[in-house]
Image (cartoon, rainbow, N blue to C red):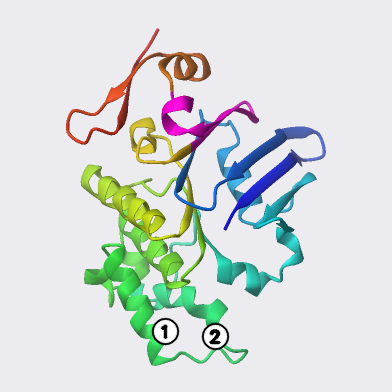
Amino acid sequence: MTLEARGIVVDVDGSTRILHGIDVVVPGTGLTALVGPNGSGKSTLLRQLSGVERPTHGTVLLDGADLHALGRRERARRIAVVEQEAASELALTCLEVAMLGRMPHQGLLGATSREDRVVATEALRRAGADAWAERSFASLSGGERQRVRLAAALAQQPRILVLDEPTNHLDVRASLETIALLRTLADDGVTVVAALHDLTLAGWADHVALLADGRLAASGPVAEVLTAERIASVYDVRAHVGPDPLTGRLAVTVALP
């Protein structure tokens, strides 16, 4: 499924403009990385693309139709969102949190089926969180909670998965496992779009959209967008781009000017 932002403008407090007329397409196949310096508007754009918020001006299209024309439940059946910050004091076990992802597929009475439990349990396993299934969600570390929130999104069985800094709070191995899982989901036909800070992790993507000061600096295939010259200009650093000696994927090394 393809997401397209047309002329997206977002103002806050009636005077501060966060996004300035963004036009970007998230292809219906593969993994799209959204990158840019802090304050460039990545999280704001993700909230528009996922339908969590409405833009001040502009339109978001899902397969050519207005995303907001869909009801909330219908959107949730198609798009799952993993936000960077979410409630962490839920009085639920991790399995119960993962089960929340089944709500869009349940009837009005919200009855839980055996299938819901099976799907949620498998989602915990895929997210690397199955060992904590019966633990209190509130007892987990930030990185552990992030994995359980990812499991809840997977339990939605979405066609599109939108993630805001999915490797936030994760250690090196967990970050690699997460990006590898997103790569697998994309290869299996899920449209994945993720905001990432780590430009080398963005090298796992098929497509990249680079933001700077609330504007789209470039978008396209990862090797065409993440050039040393463009990274140096947007981030105000020195940059080197080349194949990672371990994985062969694009890797970015930076230093202060």
Residue 136: tell me if it is visible: no
Q: Earlier in the sequence, mark 1 or mark 2?
A: 2
User: Callout 1: 10 Å neighbours few (<14), some, many (20+)?
Assistant: many
Judge whether residue 217 is colored magenta. Answer: yes
Q: Is residue 182 visible?
A: yes
- Numbered circle sitting on residue 106: 2
Of the pair 207 and 213, the residue shown nearer to us: 207
Which label is found at residue 168? none
**Could you say where residue 128 lies in the image, as x and y percent from the top left?**
26, 62
Quadrant of the rendered image containing residue 114: bottom left
Give the residue at the far top of this rendering: 257
How far, Cα to Cα, is label 1 from label 2? 9 Å
Amino acid type at circle 2 is: Gln
Are discs 1 and 2 less than 8 Å apart at CB? yes
Q: Which residue is mark 1?
A: 116
At 38% from the left and 58% from the top, the residue drawn is 185
Please report the bounds of the magenta region as a residue range: 208-226
Which quadrant would residue 11 be assigned to in this image? top right
